[in-house]
Image (cartoon, grey):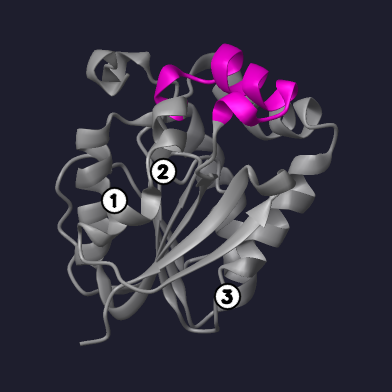
Amino acid sequence: MSANLRQEDSKVEVTGLEARYYDRLMDLVTLGWYPRFIEKAVADIGLKPGERVLDFGAGTGRNALLMRRYIGEEGGITALEIGEEMKAQFIEKTAPYPNIELIDRRIDEPLPYENEYVVVFISFVLHGFVQELRDVIVQNAYRALKPGGRFAILDYANFDVDKAPWYIRFAIRKIECPLAEDFIRRDTRVMLEAHGFGRFEEHLYFGGHLRLLKAYKPAG
């Protein structure tokens, strides 16, 4: 299946009206479920005061503001985003908080960070890349983390799409990009282990079809 997939099949880079009204659209299409879900997922990361976070594909800043509740004034967030509409919203939302910085930088190319962050967070972005670029992103996360740090991936869990409820199959095959099903069918832990990650923790949502997977860089 993956042999015929191209990065052009992705929908990970949202633009235009969809990007300008992204948060409102997410709230609307989920009938108000998404805000409660993302608050729960961010809480499950287990952030602590003073921790430094690298946010891959940071979007509108909604997640950064939620994470800031836990890291406080002493912590910091470095957010990477390339979408013009997303960046404009991010800047507007986070302007009052000097410990949140936004950098226009792709996450699917080698990054300059090494042993700098306690947490790397990525939310519903990893599935939108071909596997070769997912590997680049995972390696970027591993290199950026301090020993003992964790890579928190909020995305689809691994499951049999054919056996999923009809509305899940519909969303994956009719609404999502083809790369999503490719991601779901792969073993995410195996992918992470190949890049050096060891211990794992997971939190499942929405009948086990969504997951926060935390992968830890060995402490030494």
Question: Outermost residue toward the front?
Answer: 163
Check disc 3 and report the residue beneath it: 46
**Image marks 1 and 2: residues in contact by CB distance under 8 Å:** no
Report the side of 169 relative to 1 (left or right).
right
Instruction: Identify the image quadrant of the N terminus.
Output: top left
Q: How packed is label 3: few (under 14 Cα within 10 Å), some, or many (20 or more)?
A: few
In this rendering, is residue 154 above or below 124? below
Kindly indicate the quadrant of the structure image that contains residue 11. top left
| Boundaries of the magenta span | 161-180
Q: Position of residue 218 (x, y in %)?
A: 26, 79
In this rendering, is residue 159 above or below 95? above
Say which of 164 and 198 sits in front: 164
* In this view, the mark in front (2 or 3): 3
Check disc 1 and report the residue beneath it: 191
The CA distance from mark 1 to mark 3 is: 23 Å
Question: Outermost residue toward the right?
Answer: 31
* In this view, the mark in front (1 or 2): 1
Q: Position of residue 16 (x, y in %)?
A: 52, 15
- Return the mark for residue 57: 2
Report the side of 137 relative to 212 (left or right).
left
